[in-house]
């Protein structure tokens, strides 16, 4: 695995972790269903 | 949130408005009414929004807004939670009341269920106390007419001094007239000022006494609140208002009220409630004419059976079984179709695109064995999830879910649990997160926490992919029965755990719960499709966000240290192998199952996604690779076959039922790692073990502490292990196999 491969892998892993953070942690317990369901913000 | 608006004198407030500035401003309209009077449906029909609608009480917990144009004007509709009164007894009532009193909308659309006039008018009487212009939407008017009710619309307008428009939100009739009336009233509120209703000589005299003293002692407060409403609340000694006002001297109130108490021999709250009920009742007698000889309604006939003391629960269980049966019969062929696409053409196309671009082999493997295998394993179950959401939406819209809550309420109350708790739990069947937030409809803080701890035991849609995968392999002929048994297991364990918690952590009496039973209605196909999409799209978004992200991370964890020969030796494999002994006594002590359970903590569908990656077959050189044209042809042909198969299975056409499923890919690999007994123990474990991270975050958000999220995590995981142990060891003892 060369340096280029390592950089690509790091970018992919970083992107996946960011996506995970953005879709899970940043929403603070709000799922997509909350937009229409009964779980609006307090 | 309570802005300090100055309340004008009535005369000043009632002045005509006009001019360009007024034409340009947004008209704020609060939509208030009883639970299940059709407020959300009305707003959806008017503004084209997609607020959650169900034919049962308590769907709207918080206020929601919709902004739209009509007649060249901007209108903001604010959907308030359904309430029976404006007393401060529940969260819904407080939210609705605070908004109306403190935010003071331009006018209120009071949505009234025409088939339940008397009860709905009780709220109308209270809304009129606020002195805000009111337009009454006589909703569900079509049903009232079908029942032979004759409602004197002009009579209501004359008696109450408000505009009244008959509507049917489901059939979208009367909506234009309603909006035109809203504009008329907003532009000239003077013409539609609610009349001051007379509550009887005693109350009115006492009110005058209170008003005199109050105007002298607290003139500033009268500017902050609607006068009539404030005086009546003071007389009622409304706890919320008294706390908010924090009056130093309340002697003048005692003086004014002592005569009332003596004259009526009752407490002041009951006297006021009686006065309002008398008005609502008298008004109903004046304006509603019911046919004298009314045949027993269909709703009553059905309820005699469905709510029967002995038949109620078996019918609920049978309805659930039928729901699963229809779900799988309808969706299974489409799931297989998607599966054949992800295992064949999608991987081939990904390789065909990436290889000529010079992509390294490992990135091709990441896309094929990581993303397509992981996300694809979950996407395969989208048809089953959508089918299930469709039937759940149908049950909600038809009014049966309210009966289910009623039937379970009786059982739960009998063992000391709060019956109202079952409503958030029923919501949890779709997704646990809205169920956890719905606990705020409960008055008692202990009940809120207790119910939130029980909601994750309800089997949400995310567990479905795991069940469907395993039953297809081990229980192909009893798939719906096996999955039904898991849902029932969730309910029974919720009842059991509720009982244990109630006797230990959350001691106290369960308050009585009055459940409204709406009439049965046939939901419209459009409404069913819209709300199925709203519920189901959640899973598609999950697949495109965190399931996708986790699939990528799992691929790396299965391939690190770089060049690892066997997945067992990868980081994820090692982590799985390290905790696998914990699962030895429960029948699935292999590293593959343990690894899937680790990643499944993020979301339960990821269990399947991870298994898809773990069991992804090694790349084999194919002798003959189909062309793109052949692939496309195959996709179209197999989709046609799936449609035919679904229809045939549903209609029980001969020759379609007994087909042996050809196991391939992931299913074949699972067959080697589990037995029917261990697979059932595994499914039970997935059902019960710790809530997903979003549900945990929701509990943290709702209760402001990690404490209950941690309690939920620990007790559920322990319960899952214990139940899986009983199933596996019990099964072996009984010689079921393992």
Image: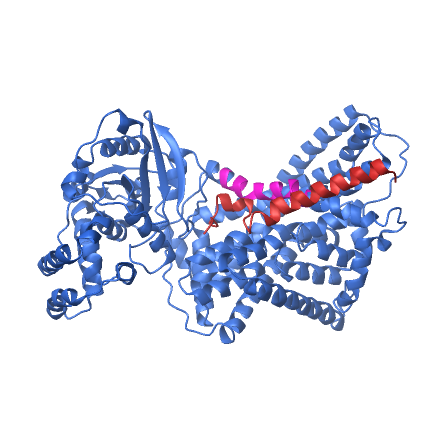
Above or below, B435 relative to B28 = below
Seen at 79% across and 42% down, the residue is B369
Q: Is residue B128 visible?
A: yes
Name the colour assigned to chain A in the rendering.
red
Q: How many marks?
A: 0
The image shows residue B528 at horizontal and vertical percentages of: 49, 40
Image position of B624 (left or right of B443): right
Magenta span includes B604: no
| Residue B545: in magenta span | yes
Q: Quadrant of residue B646?
A: top right
Residue B595 x/y as whole percent: 76, 56
The image shows residue B318, relative to residue B250, as above or below, that is above
Q: Residue at x 67, y 53 (%)?
A: B467
Q: Is residue B456 left or right of residue B312?
A: right
A7 horizontally vs B655: left or right = right
Q: Depth check: B563 or B407 in front?
A: B563
Report whether residue B674 is seen: no
Report the front residue among B48 and B302: B48
The coloring applied to the image is by chain
Rendered location of residue B154, percent (x, y): 17, 38
> Which quadrant does the C terminus of chain B fall into?
bottom right
Q: Which residues are magenta?
A: B530-548
Q: Main SS type for the magenta part? A: helix
Residue B725, relative to residue B165: is it above or below? below
Q: Chain letter for blue? A: B
- Residue B557 position, x and y percent, is 79, 50
- For image coordinates 72% across by 47% down, the residue present is B609
Residue B571 quadrant:
bottom right
Residue B146 relative to residue B413: left or right? left
């Amino acid at each position: 695995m060369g340096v280029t491969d390592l950089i690509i892998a790091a970018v992919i892993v970083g992107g996946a972790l960011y996506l995970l953070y953005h879709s899970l942690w940043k929403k603070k317990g709000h799922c997509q269903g909350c937009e229409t369901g009964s779980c609006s913000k307090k | 949130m309570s802005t300090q608006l100055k309340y004008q004198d009535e005369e000043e407030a009632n002045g005509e408005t006009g001019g360009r500035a007024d034409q340009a401003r947004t008209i704020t309209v609060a939509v208030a009414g009883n639970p299940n009077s059709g407020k959300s449906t009305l707003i959806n029909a008017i503004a084209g929004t997609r607020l959650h609608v169900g034919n049962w009480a308590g769907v709207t917990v918080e206020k929601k807004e919709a902004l739209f144009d009509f007649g060249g004007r901007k209108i903001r509709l604010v959907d308030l939670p359904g309430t029976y009164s404006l007393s401060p007894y529940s969260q819904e009532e407080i939210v609705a009341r605070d908004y109306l009193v403190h935010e003071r909308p331009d006018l209120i659309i009071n949505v009234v269920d025409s088939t339940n006039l008397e009860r709905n008018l009780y709220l109308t009487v209270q809304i009129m106390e606020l002195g805000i212009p009111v337009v009454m939407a006589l909703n569900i008017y079509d049903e009232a007419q079908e029942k032979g009710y004759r409602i004197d619309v002009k009579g209501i307008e004359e008696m109450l001094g408000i505009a009244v428009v008959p509507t049917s939100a489901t059939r979208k009739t009367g909506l234009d007239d309603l909006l035109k009336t809203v504009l008329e009233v907003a532009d000239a509120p003077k013409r539609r000022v609610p009349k001051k209703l007379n509550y009887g000589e005693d109350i009115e005299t006492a009110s005058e006494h209170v008003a005199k003293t109050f105007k002298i002692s607290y003139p500033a407060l009268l500017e902050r609140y609607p006068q009539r409403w404030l005086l009546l609340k003071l007389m009622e000694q409304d706890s919320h208002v008294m706390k908010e006002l924090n009056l130093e001297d309340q002697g003048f109130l005692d003086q004014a009220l002592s005569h009332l108490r003596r004259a009526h021999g009752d407490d002041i709250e009951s006297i006021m409630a009686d006065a309002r009920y008398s008005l609502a009742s008298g008004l109903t007698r004046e304006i509603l004419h019911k046919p004298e000889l009314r045949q027993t309604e269909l709703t009553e006939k059905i309820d005699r059976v469905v709510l029967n003391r002995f038949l109620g629960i078996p019918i609920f269980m049978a309805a659930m079984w039928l729901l699963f049966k229809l779900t799988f019969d309808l969706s299974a062929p489409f799931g297989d179709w998607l599966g054949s696409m992800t295992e064949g053409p999608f991987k081939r196309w990904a390789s065909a695109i990436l290889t000529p671009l010079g992509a390294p082999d490992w990135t091709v493997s990441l896309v094929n064995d990581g993303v397509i295998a992981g996300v694809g394993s979950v996407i395969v179950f989208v048809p089953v999830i959508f089918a299930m959401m469709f039937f759940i939406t149908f049950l909600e819209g038809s009014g049966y879910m309210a009966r289910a809550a009623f039937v379970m309420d009786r059982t739960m109350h009998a063992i000391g649990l709060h019956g109202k708790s079952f409503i958030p739990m029923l919501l949890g069947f779709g997704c646990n997160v809205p169920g956890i937030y719905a606990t705020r409809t409960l008055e008692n803080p202990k009940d809120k926490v207790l119910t939130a701890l029980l909601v994750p035991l309800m089997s949400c849609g995310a567990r479905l992919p795991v069940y469907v995968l395993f039953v297809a392999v081990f229980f192909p002929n009893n798939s719906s029965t096996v999955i039904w048994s898991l849902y029932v297991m969730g309910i029974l364990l919720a009842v059991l755990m509720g009982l244990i918690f109630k006797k230990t952590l959350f001691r106290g009496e369960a308050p009585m719960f009055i459940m409204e039973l709406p009439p049965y209605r046939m939901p419209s196909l459009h409404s069913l499709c819209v709300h199925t999409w709203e519920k189901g799209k959640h899973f598609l978004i999950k697949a495109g966000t965190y399931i996708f992200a986790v699939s990528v991370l799992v691929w790396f964890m299965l391939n690190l240290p770089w060049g690892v020969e066997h997945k067992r030796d990868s980081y994820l494999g090692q982590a799985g192998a390290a905790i696998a002994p914990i699962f030895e006594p429960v029948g699935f002590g292999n590293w593959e199952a343990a690894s899937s359970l680790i990643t499944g903590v993020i979301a339960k569908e990821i269990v399947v996604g991870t298994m898809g990656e773990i069991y992804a077959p090694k790349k084999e050189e194919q002798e003959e690779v189909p062309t793109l044209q052949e692939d496309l042809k195959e996709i179209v042909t197999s989709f046609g076959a799936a449609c035919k198969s679904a229809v045939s299975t549903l209609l029980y056409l001969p020759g379609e039922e007994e087909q042996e499923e050809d196991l391939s890919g992931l299913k074949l690999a699972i067959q080697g790692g589990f037995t029917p007994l261990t697979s059932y123990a595994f499914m039970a474990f997935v059902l019960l073990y710790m809530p997903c991270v979003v549900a945990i975050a929701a509990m943290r958000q709702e209760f402001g502490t990690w404490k209950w999220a941690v309690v939920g995590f620990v007790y559920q995981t322990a319960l899952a292990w214990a139940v899986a142990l009983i199933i596996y060891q019990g099964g072996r003892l009984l010689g079921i196999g393992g």
